[in-house]
Image (cartoon, rainbow, N blue to C red):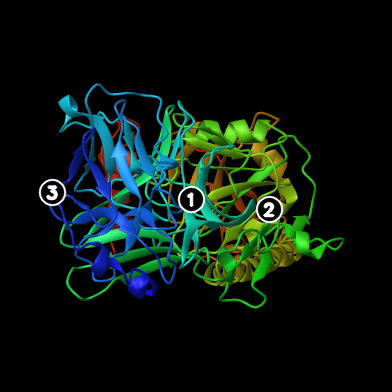
């Protein structure tokens, strides 16, 4: 409070007498003009007058600070009007401030007593009453840290004792001349998950946001640094925040200013003065309920207020925020949409559990028709790592933050699907379009190819039938010319047992030869033109014509042909004595033949 540089103008006169001590007992007192100094000389306690006021107060200030920044005031609501005040500790351990008439101006309110009480100013700036036999311990009958003014010092708790009901809260000064409680206060609200709230009178003005194990979701600037550490403690007995100054040469204090701003201030000693490291609120979006229900505030956009995905502006009362696009059905069709980078909503009326798993938290919210959102309670070990926090009413006071945790808001199923599609990144949407186009092109290409194949095969079948008919006609024409019978394909197939491998006699350049038996019992040999043969129809016809003309008793007789169903078949009479090579190469005995016959056969086979 640099504004206080001239507020304590009379210190040079009033502190001329300094008793170098940090403790008083029941036989001692502190009069106006005397001070107590902590053992390390960091803090001093005595009488002062703020600003231009002539009223006198008992307070604590930084001893070596040129501005004498006040950190605690005893009688802030009832000042002395002159310099006749005396501070004492009575026989049961109660501090009393008396005026010239020995009237009580202020006293420490305590229900405990001590046998041999002493009052001591500690190096932390804490003014305590304890039994002298307990000196050096933290067994205090009373301490100033339990009754903060506008300042919180390192190691001092800001919060509530749930067992005793003690509420350690800070309140601003009314003015630079009057340290009595002003309009603004900071305290923990404990209706639901505990949260630190700034109020002007009884009206909420700012929330620090819920504690997530690392920081407050609405005050990322209040973070651990090399010279500053803080934490929040929440259990069955107490809920409070506390901070420490890592470097003892750098003095830190948290102060609520007269205009409601919470300031973290730092002083490195000497005449450098106090520096404001950070302050809250930061911008208009920090003020409570700026955009109403189901809306978030972002100073980087115009307008600042915008409805969450799945919600629309309330047309009946635009100042009340947003309403659902689709009402919840309270069944399995409802789902959740994840929102990141938001200050979590007001936790008033919420429910929390410190040990529940994140999945159980989701299921619990889904089954409860009144539940509107859920989040992890503690993310210190990773996102969604531990605990459960459930909201049951409208989601209020959200702000877009650069660093915060996730919240899962319950919505109707169709809104969930629409939001998921909407949130697809542009490159994914483009990729999806390209993929769709490729699939369409490939599908079209495959369809065209299939149609082409079908048409081609249909044309080929059509041509095949014409060719077969033509070939059949040609064969019939040859039959008329050569008087050669035309066999039906079914007759040949039946005779050869559908060209069974058991009926195969051999294989030549023309193709395989099968044995067959006609219905009248006649044995036949069927030559089947191989489909891989290069012989065309004309060659086949020429062979039929020439063989049919070579009729001799020593030659196998051609009985007929068949040109049907794509087949080209020659039907010969069957010779039961096997082929000539068996006899030539001695594969079977050749008793029926003389050596003369064999020589004749070999002579005929010699090339000429």
Viewer can see residue 568: yes
- Which image quadrant: the N terminus? bottom left
How would you rate the neighbour count of disc 1 (Cα within 10 Å): few for under 14, some for 14-19, many for 20 or more? some
- Which image quadrant: the C terminus? bottom left
Residue at the (33%, 74%) spot, across then down = 5
- First in residue order: circle 3 vs circle 1: 3
Residue on which disc 1 sits: 78
Q: Is residue 606 above or below residue 102?
A: below
- First in residue order: circle 3 vs circle 2: 3
Residue on which disc 3 sits: 39
Residue 358 placement (x, y as % from top left): 49, 36
Residue on which disc 2 sits: 417
Residue 363 placement (x, y as % from top left): 59, 32
Which residue is at the front of the view, 91 or 221? Answer: 91
Residue at the (44%, 57%) spot, across then down = 81
How would you rate the neighbour count of disc 2 (Cα within 10 Å): few for under 14, some for 14-19, many for 20 or more? few
Q: Secondary structure at mark 3?
A: loop
Q: CA distance from mark 2 to mark 1?
A: 63 Å
Q: Quadrant of residue 161?
A: top left
Residue at the (70%, 55%) spot, across then down = 293
Q: Secondary structure at mark 1?
A: loop
Which residue is at the front of the view, 324 or 230? Answer: 230
Farthest right residue?
Answer: 316
Are dots 2 and 1 in contact, CB under 8 Å? Answer: no
Q: CA distance from mark 3 to mark 1?
A: 29 Å
Which residue is at the front of the view, 474 or 35? Answer: 35
| 390 with respect to 295 (left or right) | left
Farthest front residue?
Answer: 101
Query: Which numbered dot is residue 53?
Result: none
């Amino acid at each position: 409070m640099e504004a206080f540089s001239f507020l304590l103008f009379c210190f040079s006169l009033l502190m001329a007498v300094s008793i170098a001590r940090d403790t008083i007992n029941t036989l001692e007192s502190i009069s106006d003009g005397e001070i107590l100094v902590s053992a390390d000389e960091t803090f001093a306690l005595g009488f002062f007058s703020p600003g231009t006021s002539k009223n006198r107060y008992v307070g604590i200030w930084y001893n070596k600070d040129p501005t004498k920044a006040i950190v605690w005031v005893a009688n802030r609501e009832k000042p002395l009007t002159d310099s006749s005040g005396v501070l004492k500790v009575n026989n049961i351990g109660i501090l009393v401030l008396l005026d010239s008439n020995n009237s009580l101006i202020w006293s420490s309110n305590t229900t405990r007593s001590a046998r041999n009480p002493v009052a001591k100013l500690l190096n932390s700036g804490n003014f305590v009453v304890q039994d002298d036999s307990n000196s050096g311990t933290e067994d205090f009958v009373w301490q100033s840290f339990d009754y903060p003014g506008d300042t919180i010092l390192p190691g001092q708790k800001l919060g509530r004792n749930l067992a005793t009901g003690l509420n350690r809260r800070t309140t601003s000064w009314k003015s630079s001349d009057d340290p009595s409680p002003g309009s603004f206060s900071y305290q923990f609200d404990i209706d639901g998950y505990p949260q630190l709230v700034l109020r002007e009178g009884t009206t909420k003005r700012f929330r620090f946001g819920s504690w997530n194990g690392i920081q407050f979701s609405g005050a990322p600037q209040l973070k651990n640094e090399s010279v500053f550490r803080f934490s929040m403690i929440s259990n069955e007995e107490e809920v409070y925040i506390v901070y420490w100054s890592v470097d003892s040469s750098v003095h830190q204090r948290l102060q609520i200013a007269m205009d409601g701003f919470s300031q973290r201030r730092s002083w490195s000693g000497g005449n450098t003065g106090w520096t404001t490291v950070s302050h809250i609120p930061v911008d208009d979006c920090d003020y409570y309920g700026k955009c109403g229900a189901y809306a978030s505030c972002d100073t980087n956009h115009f307008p600042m207020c915008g409805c969450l995905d799945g919600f629309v502006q309330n047309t009946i009362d635009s100042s009340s925020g947003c309403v659902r696009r689709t009402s919840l059905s309270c069944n399995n069709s409802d789902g959740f949409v994840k929102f990141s980078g938001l200050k979590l909503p007001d936790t008033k009326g919420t429910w929390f559990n410190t040990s529940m798993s994140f999945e159980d938290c989701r299921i619990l919210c889904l089954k409860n028709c009144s539940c509107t959102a859920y989040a992890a309670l503690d993310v210190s070990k990773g996102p969604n790592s531990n605990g459960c926090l459930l909201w049951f009413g409208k989601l209020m006071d959200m702000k877009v933050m650069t660093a915060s945790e996730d919240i899962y808001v319950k919505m109707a199923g169709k809104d969930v699907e629409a939001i998921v599609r909407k949130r697809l990144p542009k490159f994914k949407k483009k990729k999806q379009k390209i993929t769709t186009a490729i699939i369409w092109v490939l599908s079209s290409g495959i369809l065209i190819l299939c149609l082409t194949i079908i048409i081609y095969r249909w044309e080929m079948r059509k041509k095949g039938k014409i060719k077969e008919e033509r070939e059949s006609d040609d064969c019939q024409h040859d039959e008329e010319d050569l008087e050669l019978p035309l066999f039906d394909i079914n007759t040949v197939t039946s005779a050869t047992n559908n060209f069974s491998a058991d009926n195969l006699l051999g294989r030549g350049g023309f193709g395989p030869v099968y044995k067959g038996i006609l219905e009248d019992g006649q044995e036949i040999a069927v030559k089947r033109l191989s489909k891989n043969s290069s012989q065309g129809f004309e060659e086949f016809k020429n062979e039929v014509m020439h063989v049919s003309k070579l009729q001799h008793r020593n030659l196998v007789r051609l009985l007929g042909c068949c040109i049907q169903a794509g087949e080209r078949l020659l039907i010969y009479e069957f010779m039961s004595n096997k082929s000539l090579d068996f006899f030539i190469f001695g594969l079977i005995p050749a008793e029926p033949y003389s050596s003369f016959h064999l020589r004749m056969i070999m002579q005929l086979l010699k090339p000429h």
